[in-house]
Image: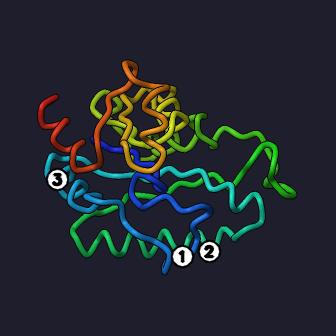
Amino acid sequence: MRKVIFLDRDGTINIEKSYLHKWEDFEFEKNAIEGLIELKNLGYEFIVVTNQSGIARGYYTENDLRILNKKMVIELQKHGVTILECYYCPHHPDNGIGHYKAVCECRKPNPGMLLEGIEKYNVDIENSFMVGDKKSDLDAGEKAGLKSILVLSGYGEKTKIEVEGKYLIAKDLLDISKLLKCIK
């Protein structure tokens, strides 16, 4: 069984920018790459799970998102970090257009993307985590049977008030590697 860290993308791996979909606008969060390298060295693998309501709203296409995610994955590979898969939810229950306006199991806080990854990659849920900057990320992890960790990047500082005492909290991905060294 695999030890996996499920990662939200925007505000966790990269700097939060509204409806990010162009590589030239992509910037890694401070310590994101270093943190992923350290987590890899602790034996973790990675799956990205990201809500992308910009697709539902018609701001960009699924292909735009796939291109950006592929470039992110290639950049991380240059640092020795492999992403097993990038799952995304293109739906929004209220603001979606056409078939993207939907209530679904994949949109966090629902655990659909995580459950799919858990099954496909034979994930050891007892020793795996969900990491994100929003309560919906943490709740999705909990619903999937994972321990969740809030990062204070992105919307994390705002989210901290809502979740303090319920979830583990770390400054960034590098700080998570330090936290998980202590848990082991």
Mark sitting earlier along the chain (1/3): 3
Cα–Cα span, label 3 and label 2: 30 Å
Q: Amino acid at mark 2?
A: Asp
Residue 2 horizontal side relative to residue 14, left or right: left
Q: Which residue is mark 2?
A: 64
Mark 3 vs 2: CB contact within 8 A: no
Residue 38 badge: 3
Q: Which residue is mark 1?
A: 67
Q: Amino acid at mark 3?
A: Glu
Residue 24 horizontal side relative to residue 98, left or right: left
Query: Is 10 or 145 nearer to us in this picture?
Result: 10
For label 1, the SS is helix
Task: Give percent across and percent down for residue 3.
Answer: 27, 41
Query: Is 180 or 30 nearer to us in this picture?
Result: 30
Q: Amino acid at mark 1?
A: Ile
Residue 40 badge: none
Q: How is the image coloured?
A: rainbow
> Crowding at label 2, few (<14), some or many (≥20) Cα neighbours within 10 Å?
some
Mark 1 vs 2: CB contact within 8 A: yes
Task: Give percent across and percent down for residue 76.
Answer: 31, 69
Which picture quadrant has residue 170?
top left
> Crowding at label 1, few (<14), some or many (≥20) Cα neighbours within 10 Å?
some
The residue sitting at 81% across, 44% down in the picture is 94
Task: Give percent across and percent down for residue 130.
Answer: 40, 38
Q: Quadrant of the C terminus?
A: top left
Which picture quadrant has residue 85?
bottom left
Residue 39 against residue 179 in the figure, above or below:
below
The residue sitting at 69% across, 70% down in the picture is 60
The residue sitting at 43% across, 41% down in the picture is 156
